[in-house]
Amino acid sequence: MFDVFVAFRFLRESRAQTFLILGGIVLGIAVQVFLNALISGLQADLIRKTVGHAPHIIGTTPDAEPVAVLPSDPREKTIVRIVTNEGGVKVIRDGAVIGSQIEKLGAFTVILPVARGSGYVWQGQKILPVILRGADLETADRLYDIRRRLTAGRYEVGPDTVLIGKDLAAKLRLEAGSVLRLSAAGGGEDLFRVGGIFDLENQVLNETWILLSLARAQNLIGLDRGLSEIELQTKDVFEAERRAAELRAVFPSVRWRSWEETNASLLSALRSQSSSSTLIQLFVLLSVTLGIAGVLAVSVIQKSRQIGILKAIGTMTRHVGRIFVIQGAVLGFLGSVLGVLAGAGLIFLFQGISGGSPSAFPFSVSFGAAAVSVAAATAAGTLAAFIPARRASRLSPIEVIRNG
Amino acid sequence: MAEFLALRDIVKIYGTTARTTALRGVSLSLAAGEYAALIGRSGSGKSTLLNIIGTLDRPTSGEMRVDGRDIFALDDDGLAAFRGRTIGFVFQFHHLLPEFTALENVLLPFRAAHGRTTAAASVRARRLLERVGVGDRMNHKSNALSGGQQQRVAVARALINEPRLILADEPTGNLDTESSEAIKALLREINRESGTTFLIVTHDRHIAAGCDRVVEIDDGGIVRDFRPPETTADEAWAALAPCECRERVRGDGGPAPTRP
């Protein structure tokens, strides 16, 4: 308590120094908080646009090896080679088992078993290629956010009801309630009613996707009870590749691909942005540390007489050291709390400038990050005080007392 | 009077390569309640001795016992705790902390010893400040006080933990005659009131002459130890003359210095 009392008094009585260093810390931390919010906001925005409504990991059957029907004989002059896919549609047979095992891992927010196949939609004279996708609608909504983006009809599928994209509907002049004929590449064919029309803000999907119930799609495509893919979303977008590697080890019969594998260039851009942001924050922290260390080093020299007296009147060496460690911690803590507030003020200011439109400055304000800033600056301040504190605790009272 | 503090064969050597012997085997004991002066030329070793008695410095060899306890067997924190509770310091340059008020300065040794102040300690500090005559200025920052007032506050600070020994190093060395007389009288009064042992390092013959006992140190050893009350005033005055003056007196048999 004595050390706290003296530490606060020293800070209060060296007002100019205290305010200067506090100002420096506040500025540094404010910039740190502001940049952090901006950069992570931009990243979150970009990631949300890229993979927010898409699977992070897709499990498919391994590509079928093309098989030569006629063996090529090197002795023959003419080489004839006919290549075909073996065995037609590849199917994940044990999809239900894999699904429940994946669920037990607890690492995924969405597990979507999909029956997928190519096919055609027939409407009058027009035949258009489409992708037939059968999946549980509720689960699919959590991944693709379809219900909110329905432009007509209702969000439901049944034995004879499907959902189609808005561009396909426009091309075929279909609306909710219209009837269309679907045929799968495997041979199945049937009539369906358009239950609803969606707009996934992506022309390819809006032109080609037909959503069915899982059972109906399996039946139409001819998968029996098998799946063609399992789509997964991870809790943290950036752990997708690690999780995919785990899945590869556990379920080698399925080919697992993470979004990170398919979006490598975007990813490296995001990574370098993240690391430059980390670098900036480290440098801010370093300058906070050096600033506090410098101010306290000067303070120890200025207060060497006081330190000598405090020792002479019975203050223990470790308490003398603590007086400075406490000052460092207080400067780091107070400066960073004020800095976080200033940073938050800066964010509000910029949001005000952008007229409240969140897209101009997509800040991601995180209390966790603010708490980390405060904790890191406090720790840095404490650490910075160690060398001055050691100096102070080693000061001999004899010299300073004798020489006034 | 009971023996309170005893030094035995205290040797202090500074430096390792160029060795300077500051004290060469000093033995000295102080009785409880004694009012003693320590005199000597500069460089005689009296400051070194005072630092060792004050436990601000450790002797190279020899021991110091307080109430029979070997003090230098304590570690540094033990010494600090012992010092805080047993010894009060009055320095030549008062050495108050400018960051604190007079009252807070007086309470600092109490806080250092107990971590925080108590209502009783506060009351005691106020009484002490009134006792030393600065009761009306106790809430002023220490550097807003005059030199004499600061030294009074320093005396109050030395007394807050009710120490058994007060070490005063040239307590009037930096004061004008009037303040100097007042501090001198104050220290003596406190000694009589509380029975606190005093050891006062001084160049001032007036102070030394008013002490129960005078210990003179020269070249790292005690050269004289006498009691002024047991001598005549003129003898005491002569005895307290600067060394070089005494040597001259002895050498040519000239007139002995007389009291002005």
Image: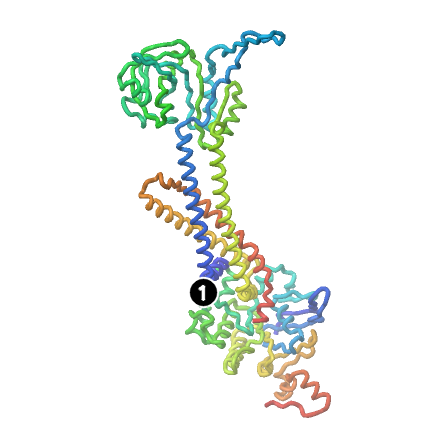
**Quadrant housing residue B24:** bottom right
Residue A131, image x, y percentages = 39, 18
Amino acid found under the numbered disc labelled 1: Ala
Q: Residue furthest bottom?
A: B255
**Quadrant housing residue A164:** top left
Above or below A348: residue B184: below
In the displayed structure image, the side of residue A339 where residue B22 appears, left or right:
right
Label 1: element kind: helix
Q: Residue furthest front?
A: A77
Above or below A359: residue B199: below
> Which residue is drawn at the image coordinates 42% and 30% (left, top)?
A51
- Quadrant location of the C terminus of chain B? bottom right
Instruction: Out of B221 and A134, give the one closest to the viewer.
Output: A134
Instruction: Out of B160 and A276, give the one closest to the viewer.
Output: A276
Residue A257, image x, y percentages = 49, 24
In the displayed structure image, the side of residue A187 where residue B181 appears, left or right:
right
Instruction: Out of B33 and A31, give the one closest to the viewer.
Output: A31
Callout 1: chain: B
Residue A179, image x, y percentages = 28, 14
Disc 1 target residue: B120
Mark 1 closeness class: few <14, some 14–19, many ≥20 residues within 10 Å: few
> Which residue is drawn at the image coordinates 47% and 47% (left, top)?
A375
- Quadrant location of the N terminus of chain B? bottom right
> Which residue is drawn at the image coordinates 44% and 17% (left, top)?
A228
Q: Is residue B84 visible?
A: no
In the displayed structure image, the side of residue A145 where residue B163 appears, left or right:
right
